[in-house]
Each structure stands twice: as C-alpha cells, then as structure tokens.
Image (spheres, grey):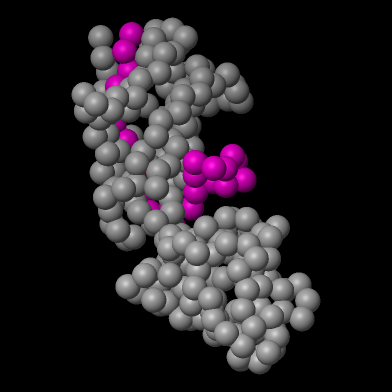
Amino acid sequence: MPNRILIDSLYRESGTPENYVIKIFNPIKNIKSVRLLAASVPNSVYPIRTGYNDTLNFTYSGAKTATLTQQNYTGSQLAAELQSKIQTAIASTNVTVVYNSQLNKLIFTESGGTAFTIATQTTTPYCIKALGCAAAQTCTSASFTSTYQVDLSYPRYMICDIFAQESFGEGTNTAFNSHSFVVPMTTSNFGDYENYNANSFFQQQERMSNISFQYINVKWFVPDSDDTGLLFFNNVDHQLILEFTD
C-alpha cells in the first residue's frame, strides 16, 4: 500500500537545506520501493561558484589567474567582473571585456601590444564553459569574441539522494539505503522556485530492500560533482513528496 510523505527541509532534525535528516512521525515498515512524486526547489544556486568555475587561467607576460566573486550574474555584470579581475591580475587597464547581448558572447580587447591568451584551464576547468571561451583564444592590440555563448544556466538539473535509515532510534546506526533522483532546473529563473511533478513520461522509482525506517537523510548534489560539490541553497528551504510502497 503506498505511503505518501511530504518532506519540508524547514522541519529537519539536523543539518542544512542541502544535507539534512528529517524524522517521520510514524515509522514506515517493510518498504519495497520509493518514488519521487514532486519537488519544489529554490533556484538559488549561483551560476559562478567558488572552487568550481570561478577562476580563469590566462597568460599576459606570464601565467595569470582571474578569480570571480561567487554570485548571480547577468552577461554585462559578468563582463564587468571579469574585466576588473583581469585588470587587477595584470596591474593594467590594457585588457577590457564587454558583453554583446545580441550574440550572448564576451569580447576581449588588448590595447598595449602584449598578447592576452586564454590558457588551458587547470584551476577550475568549468570556468571557460560559463564564459563561452576556448583555450588558446588570443589577441594582441586587437580583439577576439568568445567562441561559444555565455552560459549562466548552471545547474540545468540537480541530484537528490535519499538515504532511508533502518533504525527507529536516534543512535549511530549507519545502515542507510541510498536512492537518487533527478530534478530538472529548466523553467525557473534565479530567485524563483522550480516545481517538478512526475508524469507518465518521466517517472523515477527505485527498489528498496524491504526495510523499515523512521529517519530520512536528504542530500543534494550538482550533476558533475560528488560530496565536495554539495549544493548551496543559500539557506532557502524546499519540499519533496515521496511515495513509499510496501
């Protein structure tokens, strides 16, 4: 018989909105499967994130880096921030960056006769994906336009891991069953909520090993990271509806 449970991270026993433990009022017994029916998740993940895609490697009279501030950006704001950090790194205003809204691309200009070159990315490789640049793009007393479009849509989806704790107690039992679900982030703007509802075309259900439990650990990830890439919802809570079947 299906048991549907609304989980609200606001009422967690411990943790943060990205990684928390919540207690179910009545223990659930002999569960064989779990399905994600719905989710209401804040679109509050910054498209530029510290340690993930915030640092551009480039050369200008030697190897340099420009580290962007972690926050939300428009294309124009991104260009201004990038220009500021590049000029600080080279101690000169000879490199400028502007955003072309019609192309959705960045235009880099060097005016001092020294080659400015996008380097192979070693610090945070995903930076040039956000900027639309490609390694080896260069200019000397000239300009170049980024090869690809600026991409501030990150992340396009998130992964929600559900860990069902078999123990009814609050002790140190670590016997967790792990189940992963995908929540697309495709219809909302930054600052809004993304609402996911299962339908006949996209249903996510995972088998469980006939377990009983009273605690659930919910943990969110970006699609291309493990624990070190844990999402940061900026302290905004979210809701899930799970269906457990015995």
Q: Percent position (x, y) of residue 104?
A: 38, 68
- The residue at 41%/30% (across/down) is 181
Q: Classify residue 169 as left or right of residue 189.
A: right
- Residue in the picture at 62% in, 55% down: 125
Residue 67 against residue 17 in the figure, above or below:
below
Can the viewer see residue 10? Answer: no
Q: Which residue is the extreme one toward the left?
A: 200
Q: Position of residue 191 (x, y in %)?
A: 32, 60
Q: Residue at x 42, y 77 (%)?
A: 99
As rendered, which of 131 and 7 lies closer to the eye?
Answer: 131
Which corner quadrant of the image does residue 204 belong to? top left
Q: Is residue 50 above or below residue 77?
A: above
- Considering only vertical position in the picture, is 132 above or below 114? above
Quarter of the figure with residue 44: bottom left
Q: Residue at x 43, y 42 (%)?
A: 158
Magenta part of the protein: which range?
221-246
- Rendered location of residue 27, percent (x, y): 38, 18
Question: Does the magenta portion include 226?
Answer: yes
Residue 239 falls within the magenta-colored stretch: yes
Q: Image quadrant of residue 91?
A: bottom right
